[in-house]
Amino acid sequence: MSALPIAILASGEGTNLQALLDGPAAKGMVRIVGVASDKVDAPALTRAEAAGVPTGRFPASDYADRAARDLALADWLEGQGAELIVSAGYMQLLDPGFITRFDQRIINIHPSLLPSFPGMDAVGQALAAGASETGVTVHFVDEGVDTGEVIAVSTVPIPAGVSRGELEEAIHAAEHRLLPEVVTAIARGEIGIGEGSRR
Ligand code: GAR
């Protein structure tokens, strides 16, 4: 079986990118053909460069609008040969044209049990709500904010008195297990992507 070519979108630290580099990529299940960011100095880009993965920088200030930026981003990802796009801490909404072009080929990891706590600061939202549990969701990306079809979830308890830092750590640990699992299942064909895969 040949490795599935995937690309990662990341705005921040890139610990989920690292989990993919160390897991499915190291095992030859996937080939990471590019890492793109809206933040020119995202630590995720440094991780990619350290692993010899090509990087693309797409700051909003270089483009007239989101549609123009995401058109350039889509052209670059297609040029890299990506068949699956993984949004892993990418903090921008994707343009509808981008989503149509990669229909059912974009997945996102979100730090809550969707549909609870979508959007920004999902961990803070869960703490503020006094929830007894939260978690992690991997889902297909559609035009809404964290509304696409759910692929897999992992639950994380919120013990009484837990600090924000402790909860973030537990969520990251869950993410670093769940995202590589889902990407591996896609690479094996156990989860369908692309045209006709809508369940
Ligand atoms: C992750 O916790 C991811 O779930 C979250 O950003 C973090 C990125 O961490 N994404 C969102 O909140 C998207 N709405 P990382 O850069 O270390 O992978």
Image (cartoon, rainbow, N blue to C red):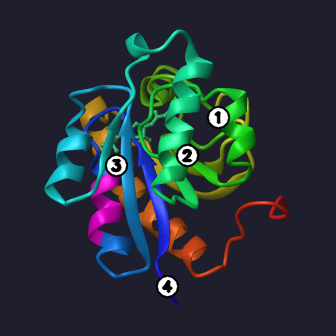
Which amino acid, mark 2?
Answer: Asn
Q: In this view, does 151 lie to the left or right of 169?
A: right
Which residue is under mark 2? 108
Which residue is under mark 1? 146
Q: Quadrant of residue 173?
A: bottom left
Q: Which of the two discs, 4 and 1, sits closer to the camera? A: 4
Tell me: is circle 3 under 8 Å from ligand 1.
yes
Q: Residue at position x 64%, y 34% from top?
A: 146
Q: Is mark 1 on a helix, strand or loop?
A: loop
Which amino acid, mark 4?
Answer: Ser
Q: How far apart are marks 1 and 2 (CA)?
A: 8 Å
Quadrant field for ligand 1: top left
Q: Quadrant of residue 44?
A: top left
Which residue is under mark 3? 172
Is 21 one of the magenta-colored residues?
A: yes
Tell me: is circle 1 under 8 Å from ligand 1.
yes
Q: Is mark 2 on a helix, strand or loop?
A: strand
Q: What is the magenta range?
A: 16-22
Q: Distance between the residues labelled 2 and 4?
A: 23 Å
Which amino acid, mark 3?
Answer: His
Is 167 one of the magenta-colored residues?
A: no
Can the viewer see residue 145 in this picture? Answer: yes
Tell me: is circle 2 under 8 Å from ligand 1.
yes
Our reading of the magenta stretch's main secondary structure is: helix
Q: Is mark 3 on a helix, strand or loop?
A: helix
The reply to whether discs 1 and 2 touch (Cβ–Cβ < 8 Å) is yes
| Nearest to N terminus: mark 4 or mark 1 | 4
Q: In which quarter of the image is residue 193?
A: bottom right
Which residue is under mark 4? 2
